[in-house]
Image: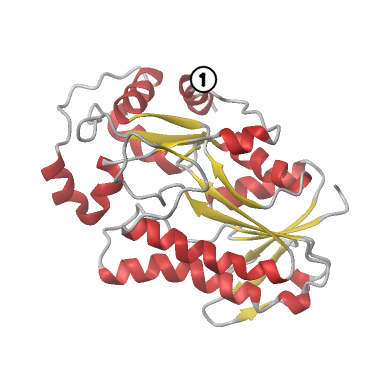
């Protein structure tokens, strides 16, 4: 596998940096596309202006695309929705236009999102074969994945629907840690809605598993799911802090977050059967175990 040459688009973001560090430490030939390259293995690109350092594409066998602005950073105004779509679709389309410069490309792996099934059937456990929902995030994921499918004309394509990632340097853990630590943490809505999650180490291992085993198609990048109440209380217990505030009810949640409140108040049960059938095993299968590891690193 060391003969493979991996190029990461979005490699300076949280997930991208974790992927780069993991593959580098494992001895892979790995480089990064960056709007602000600083290291010798970072190459300039700017999909907004259709510019790229062609040298980055030489000998690339595996292209990993983890670009895309966070859906939870701002309220979903019309402009913000366009930004969220464009930050995923435009880089993908631009990368596809560069395939002529990647004659050795074997595998295109795209990040995707776990919140793509809608919320009409809360009792159903969703698998990768289930259809997209009609809400904004579901439609965003559908557009994202269809853009990734362009690469099927030149190589194998994998789409990893990533759940919230437990990482001490960012993501949902960091967003929830501070208010809980200050005694301001609270359960969202009824607290019964499912929340999927994955430890950062399992996510990068899953990407490698897909590469090593030439797995194409769609896979859930999730370890499983728990209720919002269990997730919140587990983190509070790990931090040795109580949850003392009443639950944030639906009306207030919508007032604070707008349309984004739907992904907080609702959720889906996610199956991990497909990826486990391929022989993948999780280092951190239990939420409490995963949270404790993140909290002490």
Q: Is residue 140 left or right of residue 232?
A: right
**At 40% from the left edge and 65% from the top edge, which residue is drawn?**
84
Residue 209 coordinates in the image, percent (x, y): 71, 41
Q: How is the image coloured?
A: secondary structure
Q: Is residue 78 left or right of residue 7?
A: left
Crowding at dot 1, Cα within 10 Å, few <14 / some 14-19 / many 20+, comes out as some
The front one of 261 and 246 is 261
Query: On screen, 294 above or below 20?
Result: above
**At 85% from the left edge and 47% from the top edge, which residue is drawn?**
1
* Number of numbered discs on residues: 1
Which quadrant of the structure image shows residue 31?
bottom right
Residue picked out by circle 1:
289
Secondary element under disc 1, as helix, strand or loop, is helix
Residue at the far right: name it: 3
Query: On screen, 24 above or below 287?
Result: below
Which quadrant of the structure image shows residue 156?
bottom right
Location of the C terminus (image quadrant): top right
Residue 177 coordinates in the image, percent (x, y): 36, 33
Residue 212 coordinates in the image, percent (x, y): 78, 44
The front one of 168 and 202 is 202
Residue 275 coordinates in the image, percent (x, y): 62, 38
Q: Is residue 289 left or right of residue 32?
A: left
Residue at the far left: name it: 251
Query: On screen, 218 above or below 152?
Result: above
**At 62% from the left edge and 81% from the top edge, which residue is drawn?**
51
The front one of 155 and 25 is 155
């Amino acid at each position: 596998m060391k003969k493979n040459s991996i190029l990461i688009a979005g490699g300076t973001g949280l997930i991208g940096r974790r992927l780069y560090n993991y593959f580098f430490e494992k001895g892979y030939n790995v480089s990064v596309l960056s709007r602000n390259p600083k290291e010798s293995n970072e190459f300039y690109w700017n999909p907004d202006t259709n510019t790229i350092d062609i040298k980055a594409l030489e000998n690339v066998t595996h292209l990993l695309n983890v670009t895309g602005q966070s859906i939870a950073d701002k309220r979903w105004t019309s402009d913000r929705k366009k930004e969220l779509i464009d930050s995923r679709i435009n880089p993908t389309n631009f990368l596809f236009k560069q395939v002529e410069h990647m004659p050795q490309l074997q595998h295109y792996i795209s990040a995707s999102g776990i919140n793509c099934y809608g919320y009409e059937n809360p009792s159903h456990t969703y698998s990768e074969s289930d259809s997209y929902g009609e809400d904004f995030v579901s439609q965003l994921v559908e557009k994202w994945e269809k853009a990734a499918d362009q690469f099927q004309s030149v190589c194998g394509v994998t789409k990893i629907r990533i759940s919230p990632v437990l990482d001490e340097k960012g993501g949902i853990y960091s967003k929830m840690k501070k208010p809980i630590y200050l005694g301001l943490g609270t359960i969202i809505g009824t607290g019964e809605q499912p929340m999927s999650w994955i430890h950062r180490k399992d996510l990068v291992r899953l990407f490698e598993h897909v590469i090593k085993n030439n797995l194409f198609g769609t896979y859930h990048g999730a370890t499983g799911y728990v209720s919002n109440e269990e997730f919140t209380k587990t983190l509070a217990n790990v931090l040795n802090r109580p949850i003392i505030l009443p639950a944030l009810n639906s009306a207030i949640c919508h007032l604070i977050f707008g349309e984004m409140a739907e992904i907080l108040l609702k959720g889906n049960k996610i199956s991990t059967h497909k990826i486990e059938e391929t022989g993948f095993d999780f280092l951190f299968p239990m939420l409490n175990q995963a949270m404790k590891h993140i909290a002490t690193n």
